[in-house]
Amino acid sequence: MEQAISRDQWSSRLTFVLAAAGSAVGLGNIWKFPYITGMNGGGVFVLIYLGAILFVSMPILAAEVLIGRAGQASPVGAIRRLSRPGSPWIGVGLLGVVGGLIILSYYSVVAGWCLDYIALALTGKLSTTPVDGIPSLFDELYVSESRNLLWHFVFMAMTIGIVVGGVRGGVERASRILMPALFVMMLVLFAYATTLPGFGEAARFVFSPSVDNLTSGGILEALGHSFFSLSVGMGAMLTYGSYLSRRDCLIQSTVSIGVLDTVVSLLACLILFPITFSFGMQPSGGPGLVFKNIPVAFAQLPWGGLWAFVFFALLFVAALTSAISLLETVTAHAIDEWKLSRKTATLGTGLLVLVLGIPSALSGGAGFFGKGMSEATGRSFFDWFDHIASNWLLPMGGLGIATFVAWRLSEELRHEAFTTGSGLKRTASIYRGWLILVRYVAPVGIVAIFLHAVGVI
Ligand code: PHE
């Protein structure tokens, strides 16, 4: 295996884990997971999600990092190097680049809502609005085309600004400070939630599964979200893996990322649902859940405005570290494939995402991309992008990655790439177990869920 000498590398495994966890932990954990859990009836959805993480997404996460580290390039280049030029497997890498563009384009709009809420907190609007009026603050933002566009542009400008700095200077430095701050903030909010009267009911809602609530759409969504949440299936982790040194343990890194990400998602539910139940609100409130329920709760507290500011700053930080990884994947592709300078590549891809995000920013409005498409097709432009990217593109990409690593790579290369850097005693049996998962369990699971979703099974 050749090792590209000039390639950037993380300064240590801990930094890789922090940056990768920064990619994984994002709006998917704090905004999306609680609201789709609420809409899919709670416990049973959580259970399927946990199964999907353990048996499908986490093993594929390891496969993805493996390709990146062994191939020492961004998705397309790494797969080409590990197969051959012109190989159809390269399509898996291309799918990822397209997925990254799509996801970031609407992700940035939701991240923009956080910026708007930070502004609402700072200007005192969140603390001076009467409690009954707080939920409609979100409805106003949701339909406002100008505010959505403004914050989408601001957020993309910030993301571009960091990615221009490169792996060490930009991505790594930002994650090292922002990630630990995020965990501390989450724990403080969780401690507050345990004191609320609705905590017990919330814990039951999240942890006691009732099979009645199971739907095929819910199963597909749980699978798709396990990919989205771990940032698996589009090459983000592959790209980060390409900066991981061969001295570092792939197994430990993968497990730490998976556990951290899952803990944050469950914590988010255990912060949000106690508030929801304690203040007599509905768990199935949809995308507005975080933006409506959290400020309502804080409005009852002394220093409510400050709490709200801390919370949305947290959500913004989580979104930024994820957005960085999305843009970095597309940018690394442009740098490696088209030999562009980092600056040109970042600006070019960033601008592309900015433009591609405009219809999503207009999706709450009364125009074509919002009301028009919702009435005609049942989903706004934003909802289509989210549905297609997370429920279909990511699991498809994951399927490609799993089959490539499990069936195309030689046993010798795969074994070496998986175990190098591992000091664990049971490396050999972990390798065998993992191979069964990526070779049979994950592909069969993904295909079965696809067939179930289209009504074949
Ligand atoms: N994992 C991120 C989140 O949970 C989103 C993401 C998806 C980031 C895919 C990178 C790649 O918010």
Image (cartoon, rainbow, N blue to C red):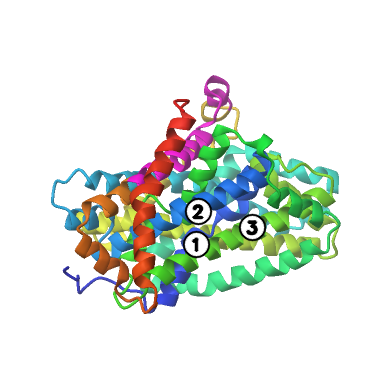
**What residue is pinned by disc 2?**
53
Question: SS of the residue at dot 3?
Answer: helix
Q: Residue at x 49, y 68 (%)?
A: 256
Q: Nearer the viewer, mark 2 or mark 3?
A: 2
Tell me which numbered mark, 2 or 1, is placed earlier along the sequence: 2
Tell me which numbered mark, 2 or 3, is placed earlier along the sequence: 2
Distance, label 2 to label 1, CA atoms, is 8 Å
Q: Residues within 10 Å of mark 1 (few under 14, many from 20)?
A: many
Tell me which numbered mark, 3 or 1, is placed earlier along the sequence: 1
Q: Residues within 10 Å of mark 3 (few under 14, many from 20)?
A: some
Q: Residue at x 64, y 57 (%)?
A: 266
Q: Could you tell me if the residues under marks 2 and 1 are in contact, i.e. CB atoms within 8 Å?
A: yes
Q: Is residue 301 magenta?
A: no
Circle on res. 258: 1
Circle on res. 266: 3
> For the residue marked with disc 1, what is the amino acid?
Gly
Distance, label 3 to label 1, CA atoms, is 12 Å
Task: Specify start and end residues of the magenta stretch as a single range.
Answer: 371-399
Question: SS of the residue at dot 1?
Answer: helix
Q: Is residue 252 left or right of residue 197?
A: left
Question: SS of the residue at dot 2?
Answer: helix
Distance, label 2 to label 3, CA atoms, is 13 Å
Question: Is 16 drawn above or below residue 120 in the view shown?
Answer: below
x then y, percent, for residue 416: 25, 69
Q: Is residue 155 left or right of residue 169?
A: right
* Observer able to see residue 100: no
> For the residue marked with disc 3, what is the amino acid?
Leu
Relative depth, front residue between 215 and 33: 215
Circle on res. 290: none
Question: Is 193 drawn above or below residue 252 in the view shown?
Answer: above
> For the residue marked with disc 2, what is the amino acid?
Ile
